[in-house]
Amino acid sequence: AQTVTQSQPEMSVQEAETVTLSCTYDTSESNYYLFWYKQPPSRQMILVIRQEAYKQQNATENRFSVNFQKAAKSFSLKISDSQLGDTAMYFCAFKRTGNQFYFGTGTSLTVIP
Amino acid sequence: KAGVTQTPRYLIKTRGQQVTLSCSPISGHRSVSWYQQTPGQGLQFLFEYFSETQRNKGNFPGRFSGRQFSNSRSEMNVSTLELGDSALYLCASSFSSGGDYEQYFGPGTRLTVT
């Protein structure tokens, strides 16, 4: 079975600073996809960034980047220049070649002005 | 393009009743997945439908069922409601099943069972 673990239930960061959210996963698959989703308070979940396991290069989307360590089964999210609008619940997710997503329990991030 | 829509947005039911939730995917999307979100458990996968067929199923009792129509709209049904079924139910659509297609989430239906 696939499991996704987010060991930081809550985090906070000062505006304009950098924060890293951790995620580890467990799988015996060699081909899979990893995602970070953001769920702002009372708003819809949206995709932040994704990574294909066969790609060694870490994905980057503007201020968001990942540190993908396949051997360690680690997939952390780094947010640079944190903004107030980054305050949200962040979910790490794993997907095999089918369409079944496995989500972690989430990290609640608060950006402090 | 319109996003994923879910109806109703809020629902209050009594134990023992049944409930039906509806999800309309993004136009052109044929895969619809359902998730249960609770504070303690996070998001748990219920099932996925693709082209009117259930493709994957999570570890939920048979009281939870679903279906998909030819226009890709999907419904989820929960029978004999229990207090523990109180949750935010999220629907997500994607273009296809498999591959690295992103899932787009709806706003959710907040179900409260009293």
Image: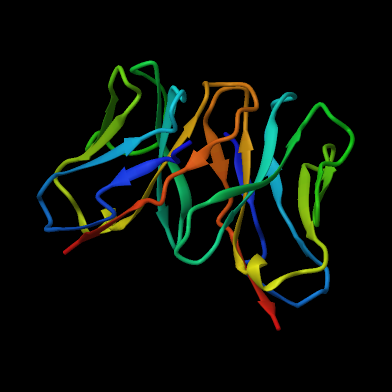
Q: Is residue B27 left or right of residue B63?
A: right
Q: Is residue B21 left or right of residue A15?
A: left
- Residue at 11% x, 58% y: name it: B14
- Front residue of B2/B80: it is B2
Q: Is residue B72 left or right of residue A49?
A: left
> What is the tally of numbered marks visible in this picture?
0
- Residue at 50% x, 67% y: name it: A41
- Front residue of B59/B8: it is B8
- Residue at 67% x, 73% y: name it: A84
| Residue A2, x across and y down, in percent | 60, 36
- Front residue of A104/B98: it is B98
- Front residue of B86/B4: it is B4
The colour style of the image is: rainbow
| Residue B29, x across and y down, in percent | 46, 25
Residue B32 visible, this angle? yes
Q: Residue furthest bottom?
A: A113
User: Compared to A30, does A60 lie above or below?
Assistant: below
| Residue A37, x across and y down, in percent | 61, 50
Q: Kindly indicate the quadrant of the structure image that contains residue B66.
A: top left
Image quadrant holding the C terminus of chain B, namely bottom left
- Residue at 72% x, 49% y: name it: A24
| Residue B77, x across and y down, in percent | 22, 38
User: Compared to A33, does A16 lie above or below?
Assistant: below
Residue B58 visible, this angle? no
Q: Residue furthest front?
A: B1
Q: Kindly indicate the quadrant of the structure image that contains residue A69.
A: top right
Q: Residue furthest right?
A: A57
